[in-house]
Image: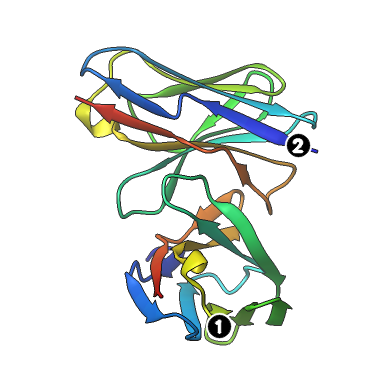
Amino acid sequence: SQTIHQWPATLVQPVGSPLSLECTVEGTSNPNLYWYRQAAGRGLQLLFYSVGIGQISSEVPQNLSASRPQDRQFILSSKKLLLSDSGFYLCAWGRGLTEAFFGQGTRLTVV
Amino acid sequence: QKEVEQDPGPLSVPEGAIVSLNCTYSNSAFQYFMWYRQYSRKGPELLMYTYSSGNKEDGRFTAQVDKSSKYISLFIRDSQPSDSATYLCAIPRNKLVFGAGTILRVKS
């Protein structure tokens, strides 16, 4: 069966510090991979998606970047965090457009 | 106009009530409709999906699509405190587009 791992679960970072969130998927190959952000009381905002190694599509211009160095590894990064980067970050995988299986999320607080 | 609109609630009901959660969408070409459930501080999990019009039932849950009015609904019968969560509708376009989510609280 497929599993998705996302860490850390909680993170508190100062403004201006770098960020690296990692997500890995097991039990499948060549998945579509997604990074979403969920602000308090708001829906899921798609940040990045990837259909293959090295292929990253950005949905929203912002202070973040994503990379896919391996087939089942997806990394969300920032060089300098802003207060507005606080939120709940979710990684997800899917085999097509009609499905997304989510990790447990990382709650990021920028102080 | 947003592609998917959903009332964020919160919706508070007594245990055993029938719950109706709703979304509207803008593009009549959409064919797949999905419902996710998200417990507090967890990632969303796929609850149900439907294709085109009509109803789909799974235990206490029924998903309904009315394409003429571009309206999708999720009904929960005999609601339980364990149903307390945020429910998000989603529509696959070139990616999944989510509604804002409705917070449901079932009081025992």
Q: Residue at x 23, y 24 (%)?
A: A82
Q: Which residue is mark 1?
A: B78
Position of B56 with respect to B11 (left or right) is: right
Q: Is residue B27 above or below residue A88?
A: below
| Image quarter in which the N terminus of chain B is found | bottom left
Looking at this view, name the residue that lies furthest to the front.
Answer: B108
Q: Is residue B53 visible?
A: no
| Residue A104 picture location, percent across and down | 52, 38
Q: Which residue is mark 2?
A: A2
Q: Residue at x 65, y 33 (%)?
A: A4
Q: Is residue B16 above or below residue B90?
A: below
Q: Chain of mark 2?
A: A
Q: Residue at x 51, y 65 (%)?
A: B82
Do marks 2 and 1 share a subunit? no
Quadrant in which residue A108 is drawn: top left
Q: Chain of mark 1?
A: B
| Residue A74 picture location, percent across and down | 59, 23
* Amino acid, disc 2: Gln
Whole-number angstrom distance, CA of label 2 to CA of label 1: 32 Å
| Residue B88 picture location, percent across and down | 49, 62
| Residue A85 picture location, percent across and down | 29, 31
| Image quarter in which the C terminus of chain B is found | bottom left
